[in-house]
Amino acid sequence: MAVQDLDVAAYCLRLGDDALVLAQRLCEWAARSPQLEEDVALMNLALDLLGQSRSLLTLAGEREGAGRDEDDLAFLRDEPDFVNAQLMELDNGDFGRTMARQLLVSAWSLPLWDALVTSTDPDLAAIAGKAVKEVAYHLDHARSWVVRLGDGTEESHRRMQAGLDEVWPYSFELFESDDLLQRLVERGVAADPAALQPIWLATVSEVVAEATLSLPETDWRPAGGRRGTHTEAFGYLLAELQHLHRSHPGVSW
Amino acid sequence: MDALEQQFQDTVDGDGRIEPRDWMPEGYRATLIRQIAQHAHSEIIGMQPEGNWITRAPSLRRKAILVAKVQDEAGHGLYLYGAAETLGADRDELLDLLHAGKQKYSTIFNYPTVSWADVAAIGWLVDGAAIMNQVPLTRCSYGPYARAMIRVCKEESFHQRQGFEALTVLANGSPAQRRMAQDALNRWWWPSLMMFGPSDDNSPNSARSMAWGIKRFSNDELRQRFVDATVPQAEWLGLTVPDPDLRYDEETGHYVFGEIDWTEFFEVMKGNGPCNRQRLATRVAAHEEGAWVREAAAAYAAKHSAREVAA
Ligand SMILES: [Fe+2]
Ligand SMILES: [Fe+2]
């Protein structure tokens, strides 16, 4: 019998929403990628993230103890109930922008999952054990594209830098802390965002330098996803995700 | 027939495999390239009608199954273009032919997926028909194609079972879900039967493909097998096959089915199906919008290898 733990439930919901929303964005690339190998690779990323989100939402539901399963959480919550970082929900833009977003997310989630492998919550640690291997590939994939596009042609350099500039400000939200995180870090359940940031910055800086790009400079730091505040684009993403499920309440699929 | 040709024909007749370095008649090579390319094009165009429902799939489990399926189809495209390349073709050139409308893909993908049940029906019927067509190709005389087909068929039969399972849930679900399932069968049944192509008993091309070990059964034989396998499944689902002439013939042990509307087939073939223009436009747009990415990868690789040489 699962033990109710609302803090762990809330934390799993954040990470589960991150993975679900990013997977949903990647799914939009189906049959539209620049080459066949990327159709395979992008669906592979989406599939990994979808798997992570299913495990995390299931665990969130268990720790919440209110009988909600992965589908209840994915399909029956409204926009303000979603607590993903806004970075995940940004429009794909072109392939360069999608890869910039993948780089910023994967460079964060790799050390995150790496830390969570030793989480004091054994179920979360088990999810982390699988996710850390998947995300290592995601980071390699994003790195190799950012480098090739940055150091490719004049056009690709320009597009890659533009994509990076567009998504960059949203990365700060990943390192925000709050009361929930402080309590969970103290319990050894969650990863400390402050500890992740230098690792993230080192990875990203190295890739950006190799790609002959420059780190964007901005003091604009949009945030609010963790508290249920989202971008305008998010409503459309949720509408698409949820409409069929909600059109037939209570049935099986 | 010279010695090389005799040796080739003996290998084929003895159920052996022709490998890329073996001598082969030019007609055999050309026929295979065209057939494999058409098959590869079908795999990648086929990602579109199903991809249409990925972002709207009604449960996370179904979404994951569908993403994995669309990913498999991209993988099938890759193996098949690879098999065509062993014959001296070039993937980029084959894609250009597809984009220019000079090579075809299966007409089935020119129909729209308008409801979630269509995704299930495609798995059940379209992957099911593809398996009937492709299982004999696992014994095709050309080694790389036969081996690609072994892997592809394994995955297609997985898709077929998943589609059938998804449709089973709908057929046993709410009245709205049942209606959705029946409507999908109504729309996909006849196009699925057309997937086997027109009757080819008197076609000289078919006779030649049979002699070359590229084709083992006639279109009509394969279509009959599909009908015989599928009608009992429809009955089990409690769905009605949209064919008033359909009946079981006790004597032959086969289902007798109504006349196929070949005018529709040839119209879709000509480009006048509901989605021909859309499918091709989407494919061409993806290719063109991705050009800068492919160019960048090539430029990077060239720079990089130049630097390595210099170092
Ligand atoms: Fe396939
Ligand atoms: Fe398939």
Image: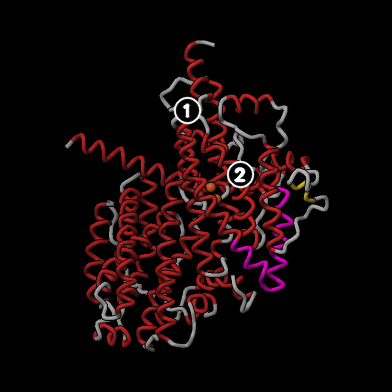
Residue B69 vs residue B230, the one in the foreground: B230
Coloring scheme used: secondary structure
Span highlighted in magenta in the image: B165-191
Q: Along the horizontal axis of the image, is B274 left or right of B5?
A: right
Q: Is residue B161 above or below residue A179?
A: above
- Front residue of B110/A223: it is B110
- B163 horizontally vs A193: left or right: right
- Expressed as whole percent of the image width and height from the top left, the position of residue B161 reads 57, 57
Three-letter amino acid code at the position of disc 1: Gly
**Residue name at image x 66 percent, y 62 percent:** B115
Q: Residue at x 26, y 83 (%)?
A: A185
Choose between A137 and A196: the one closer to the eye.
Answer: A137
Q: Main secondary structure of the magenta part?
A: helix
Q: Nearer the viewer, residue A235 or B251?
A: B251
Q: Residues within 10 Å of mark 1 (few under 14, many from 20)?
A: some
Is the residue marked by circle 2 packed among few (<14), some (14-19), or many (20+) residues within 10 Å?
A: many
Say what amino acid the circle numbered 2 marks: Met
Quadrant holding the C terminus of chain B: top left
In the image, is residue B26 part of the stretch drawn in magenta? no
Residue drawn 66% across and 50% down? Answer: B229
Label 1 belongs to which residue? B16
Whether residue A119 is situated above or below residue B261 in the rendered picture: below
Image quarter (top left, top right, bottom left or bottom right) of the N terminus of chain B:
top right
Between the C-alphas of marks 2 and 1, the distance is 22 Å
Res B132 label: 2
Q: Is mark 1 within 8 Å of ligand 1?
A: no
Q: Where residue A57 appears, x then y in whole percent? A: 43, 76
Left-right relation of A206 to A226: left
Q: Earlier in the sequence, mark 2 or mark 1?
A: 1
Q: Disc 1 is attached to a residue of which chain?
A: B
Q: From this viewpoint, which residue is outermost toward the left?
A: B311
